[in-house]
């Protein structure tokens, strides 16, 4: 069980976040976060990569993958606690990641808390070409990889109303001006790894929902390839901390269908 001490935003009450799609400029906020559960989440990422590699990675030979890795390494070189060289990265938890020991996606999965998903414009839509998803929130990377945004979000009823706005946002993104948004869900299980296929119901569990799960999502355009990087930083906290401020009727487990990036 890996739980955060606090949530730095309130997506259910902040006017800038609660109205879909709730996207705003990242501005001076960091692109990649390092929070109080860094060591615990990174150890879990290492464990999941070793045990569930096929489920948590979607590889691609697109040039955007190499550009993303270079962008992350350049960013981490300026981050507290990281030591970056051309051969390896020492994380703030003391673990050293050999940059030549594995492929770029697996390396990315071990460098930061965020899951990172790459989208490339093909035809009229951006397509998910690959990425890392070690902390899925009721969706499965293998099922979504290779599909355009509209197909990825087909199980999400609310997405149809904002689909065109989201595609316009992807088209309008410019390098150096990333965006962010946040969602929130209620879960019985605090586990970070919760994959689910389209149409699959959550398994029945005894007891009341006890955890709030939120994703801080970022959208960044790579200057070389023009690919859009969708980043997901996952928070899990005890639900009772927010009982007094959540909207009426919210204190139940979410029954949202398996979704995908941006939901």
Image (cartoon, rainbow, N blue to C red):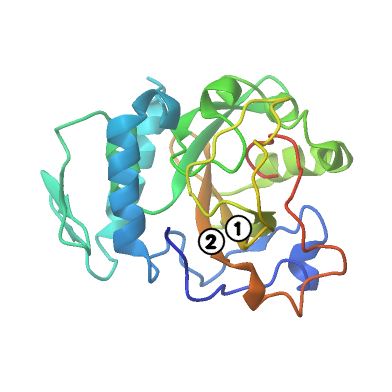
Q: Which of 126 and 155 is in front in this view?
A: 155
Name the side, left or right, on which 246 lies relative to 6. Answer: right
Choose top left, top right, bottom left or bottom right for residue 100. Answer: top left
**Residue picked out by circle 2:** 236
Provide residue 51's location: percent of width, then percent of height: 31, 31
Which residue occupies 89% across, 41% down?
161
* Quadrant position of residue 154: top right
84 on left or right of 72: left
Q: Is tag 1's residue or tag 2's residue first in the polypeptide sequence?
A: 1
- Note whether residue 108 is visible: no
Residue 153 position within the rendered picture, expressed as x and y whole percent measured from the top left: 73, 32
Query: Alpha-carbon distance for marks 1 and 2?
Result: 5 Å
At horizontal 76% and vertical 73% (from top left) the residue drawn is: 14
- Image quadrant holding the C terminus, namely top right
- Closer-to-camera residue (254/29): 254
Which numbered marker is on residue 213? 1
Q: In the rendered image of this protein, does residue 41 appear above or below residue 139?
A: below
SS of the residue at dot 1? strand
Secondary structure under tag 2 reads strand
Instruction: Residue lying at the far front in this picture: please name it.
Output: 206
Whether the residues at callouts 1 and 2 have beta carbons within 8 Å, the answer is: yes
How packed is label 2: few (under 14 Cα within 10 Å), some, or many (20 or more)? many
Task: Answer with left or right where residue 74 lies relative to residue 20.
Answer: left
Residue 152 seen in the current view: yes
């Amino acid at each position: 069980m890996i739980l955060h001490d606090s949530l730095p935003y309130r997506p259910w009450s902040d006017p800038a976040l609660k109205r879909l799609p709730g996207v705003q400029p990242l501005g001076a906020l960091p692109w990649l976060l390092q929070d109080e559960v860094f060591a615990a989440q990174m150890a879990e990422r290492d464990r999941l990569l070793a045990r569930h590699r096929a489920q948590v990675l979607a590889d691609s030979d697109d040039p955007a993958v190499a550009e993303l890795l270079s962008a992350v390494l350049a960013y981490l070189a300026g981050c507290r606690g990281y030591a970056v060289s051309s051969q390896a990265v020492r994380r703030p938890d003391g673990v050293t990641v050999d940059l030549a020991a594995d492929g770029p996606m697996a390396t990315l999965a071990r460098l930061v808390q965020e899951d990172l998903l790459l989208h490339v414009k093909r035809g009229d839509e951006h397509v998910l070409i690959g990425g890392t998803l070690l902390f899925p929130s009721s969706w499965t990377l293998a099922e979504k990889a290779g599909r355009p945004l509209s197909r990825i979000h087909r199980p999400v009823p609310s997405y149809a109303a904002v689909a065109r706005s989201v595609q316009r946002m992807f088209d309008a993104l410019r390098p150096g001006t990333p965006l962010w948004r946040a969602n929130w869900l209620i879960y019985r299980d605090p586990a970070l790894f919760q994959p689910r296929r389209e149409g699959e119901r959550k398994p029945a569990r005894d007891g009341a929902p006890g955890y709030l799960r939120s994703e801080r999502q970022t959208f960044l355009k790579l200057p070389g390839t023009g690919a859009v990087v969708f980043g997901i930083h996952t928070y899990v906290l005890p639900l009772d901390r927010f009982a007094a401020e959540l909207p009426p009727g919210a204190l139940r487990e979410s029954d949202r269908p398996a979704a995908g990036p941006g939901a």
